[in-house]
Amino acid sequence: MEWVLFLIFGLVAAAAAVGMVLQRSPIYSALCLILALFAQGGLYILLHAELIAAVHIFVYAGAIMVLFLFVIMLLDLRPEDRSPVRTNPVGVSVGLILAGLLLAELALGVGPHIALGPRGVYDFETVRAVGNTQAVGRILFREYLIPFELTSVILLAAMVGAMVLAKRKLE
Amino acid sequence: MDFLFATILKIALVMGLVLLAVAYLTWLERKVIGDIQVRYGPSRVGRFGLLQPIADGIKLMFKEDIVPANADRLIFLLAPAISIIPALIVFAVIPFGPSFVITDVNVGLLYVFAVTSLGVYGIVLAGWGSNSKYALLGGLRSSAQMVSYELSLGLSVIGVVMMAGSLSLVDIVEAQKGSWYGILPRWNVIPQFLGFVIFLLSSNAELNRAPFDLPEAETELVAGFHTEYSSMKFAMFFMAEYANMIAASAMATTLFLGGWQGPLLPPVIWFLLKVFCFLFLFMWLRATLPRFRYDQLMGFGWKVLLPAALVNVMLTAAVLLIFA
């Protein structure tokens, strides 16, 4: 049963990601990205990471992508306004090399010597015992408190910077 | 197999009830607003106009289904569906009674927020796909409004989560059991009054209902995002709006009014009574208040509700830290 769901979510995510790149209309690209994010949320649920799945959908699909759509609609890019696709030989070759490298890495990863990271303290049973949300909260606010706070300060600085740049005149 | 059957039965029951309630909410809203404005409201079809929703439904189904020229057909078709589906799947985690909940998810509250935050796509895409300036303006307004008020909506319930220590809606209701000094019910509305007011105001804005109905402001945008829609597609936007209204009332009940908790009457009846009070409040607000101006709406959301919600979070955290 889980296998089937994994296959469905995985295929949808991959197909939507490819669709996002191939679509000519930016609105359809954004919609494909939303679909990919959804399928990814489904994969998180299959991994029993309910909190991450809900936050993922809430933040990315529910807030950030709405703003993306907002901007695309404000710019009102119609298909005829956009320049035709030009194929640059350098770009194509770099892309092909990157794709080849990624495929090779993937083959190595799932091949005979499966690369496994070090096993953490929080395995499935521990997380189930303390609760999904509680486990994430504990790690975030105990072990990684300072990096977490630093990240929020950096985000705040970026936000203030964006406002300063966007405003022509500061009173 | 039994589990699957019971779940399907529950889903069918809840969906049936919600859709029936949606139909009759349109009747009730017209009656209530009519009464407030000293009119009769629907009175011709059946006794007290009780068959009016059915007549409306039949009429809408047989209306011509118009797709404007140069509209994006796929998006135009998808938009009403995208707006109604999130409105309906919210009910999967809402606890109607002690054992009457379709599924009790451990991140239930976040699930509700995640799902309701998707409803905005229906409106935005309807606005864009219609290829009409009024619809586009309505869609743009809606996306700005929904994203702004979602922040204070999300922050307003943090206090409730802190008091219950859980994101599961069943746990949140259970945490409001009993009473203070034997008379005051332990409902969150008393210690979390500020949060409750912020929640009500921002959920009213999220519902796009008067006085926050800028996305469809008739006087300036014809009908906003659904200007070009007709027939059942038009009706689906309204079904979504009323289903969202029930969901918001159910959430307010669950989070702040103790859900199904109450003396004497059976739990489900208590729950439905409280939900009905909120539904009535939403209608009353619509009948009484004029629409905000757009700058007032944004100013109110960002400069009043958001700081107030943050103050509420800090106060709750401080009180919990000192006394618990």
Image (tube, coloured by chain):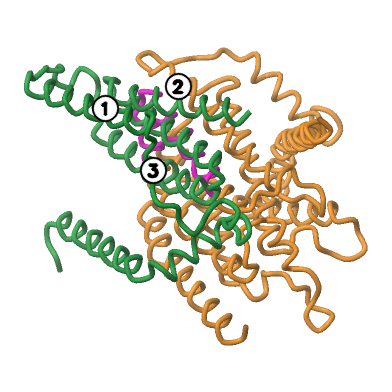
Which circle marks residue B36 in the picture? none
Looking at the image, which is closer to me, B200 or A28?
Answer: A28
Q: Which residue in the protein does label 1 denote?
A: A104
- Report the label total: 3
Host chain of mark 1: A
Dot 2 amino acid type: Phe
Mark in front: 2 vs 3: 2
* Residue A96 seen: yes
SS at mark 3? helix
Question: Same chain for marks 1 and 2?
Answer: no
- Above-or-below relation of A96 to B147: above
In which quadrant will I find the N terminus of chain B? top right
Q: Tell which chain the image draws in orange.
A: B
Query: What residue sits 60% from the left and 50% below the top?
Result: B286
Give the x, y percent position of residue B268.
84, 52
Specify the colour of chain A. Answer: green
Residue B18 forms part of the magenta stretch: no
Q: Are marks 2 and 3 in contact (CB under 8 Å)?
A: no
Amino acid type, label 3: Arg
Amino acid type indicated by mark 1: Ala
* Of the pair B196 and B297, the residue shown nearer to us: B196
Residue beneath disc 3: B141
Check whether the beta carbons of the residues at disc 1 and disc 3 lie within 8 A of each other. Answer: no
Q: Which residues are magenta?
A: B113-140
Q: Secondary structure at mark 1?
A: helix
Q: Chain of mark 2?
A: B
Apparent side of residue B135 relative to residue A5 in the rendered image (left or right): left
* Residue drawn at point x = 41 percent, y = 54 percent: B148
Q: Residue B17 vs residue A6: left or right?
A: right
Q: Which residue is mark 2?
A: B76
